[in-house]
Image (spheres, rainbow, N blue to C red):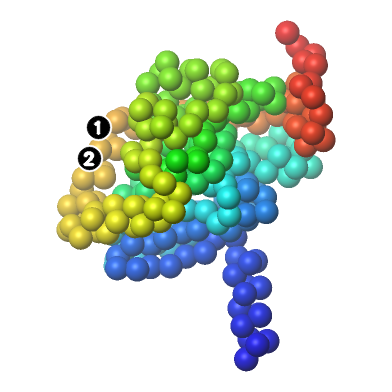
Amino acid sequence: MAAVKKAEAMSLEQSLVLSRIDDAVATLTMNRPAQYNALSMAMLVALREAVETAAADSSVRVVVIGAAGKAFCAGHDLREMRAHDDVVWQRALFDQCSALMLRLHAIPQPVIAQVQGLATAAGCQLVAACDMAVASRDARFATSGIGLGLFCSTPAVAVLDTISTKHAAEMLFSGGFIDADRAERIGLVNRVVDADALTIETQGLAQQIAAHSGAALQSGKQLLRAMRGNAATKNYELAAANMARDMQSDDAKCGIDAFLQKQATPVWRHR
C-alpha cells in the first residue's frame, strides 16, 4: 500500500498539469513549482490538452487555471529558449503559446485565472487571456521581457486586449512590476483577496457562474469576444514572428544569459 501511494505521489509530481472537476467547475493546475510554472514547450502542450479536455466535457461550465507552489507563472522557460537558438524552433514555441491563448478565447466556458505570487511575461499574458482573474494580495505582475533585451510581443496582444493602451505601454516598455491592488485598478484582475482566501474566493466565483445555464454562458462568451473584435488571431501571428525574430538578436541572447547567470544588468550592444 505504501508503495502504491508513493507511486501515485510521484505520478502527480510528474504531471505538468493537474485536473479535477467539482460541481461543473474544471480546475487545471500548472505543476512545475520548482520552475515557477514556466511555460516550456511541454507545459504549453500539456495545458492546451487539459483545456481541450475540459472544453469538450459537457458537464463543465467554468474552467479555473491555477498553479502549484509560490508562483502562478514566470513566463517562458528561458533556459529552454536559449538551448534552442534557431528561429524555426522559436517560432514554433511562440505559435504554440499563441494557440493556447486563442483557445482560451474560443472555448465555450468562461475561464478564471487564480493567481498567486509572480505572473510575469507569458505568465501575465496567461492571466490577461483568461476571461476573469482573482489574485492574492501577494501577486505581482510584469511584462518584463524588455529587461532582457526582448520586447514582450505576444504578451502585448492579451494585455492590450485587457487594459488601456497607456497602462499596457507602461508595463511593456518599463518592464516594472505592479502589485495586485494596481492590477485590479487598471482591470488586469477582477478581485484581490488575502492569500489564504484565494482558492475559496476563486471557487466561489466559479460556482456562482457555473450555477447558470451552460447555453447562456456559452452564448454570452461568444458575444463578448465578438464585440471585442476578431483581430487577436492576426495580432498573434505578427507578435509570434516578432518574438522569434527578436530572440535572434545579440541583445536578447546577452540579456537572457545575464539573467540566467544572475549577473548585473547587461551592456546592450544596440542603442
Q: Is residue 145 left or right of residue 222?
A: right
Question: Residue at 22% of width from left, 40% of height from top?
Answer: 223
Where is residue 170 shown, x and y percent of the image?
50, 18
Q: Are marks 2 and 1 in contact (CB under 8 Å)?
A: yes
Q: On the image, numbered disc 2 is attached to which residue?
A: 223
Quarter residue 151 falls in: top right
Q: Position of residue 180 (x, y in %)?
A: 44, 35
Task: Answer yes or no: is residue 124 visible.
Answer: yes
Classify residue 32 by image quadrant: bottom right
Q: Is residue 260 left or right of residue 222?
A: right
Element type at marker 2?
A: helix
Instruction: Determine whether 63 is above or below 161 in the image.
Output: below
Q: Residue at x 60, y 65 (%)?
A: 15
> Pointer 1: residues within 10 angstroms few (<14), some, or many (20+)?
few
Which residue shows up at 60% across the image and 40% down it?
75
Tell me which amino acid carries mark 2: Leu
Q: Is residue 154 visible in the rendered structure shown here?
A: no
Q: Which residue is mark 1?
A: 227
Amino acid type for the residue under numbered disc 1: Met
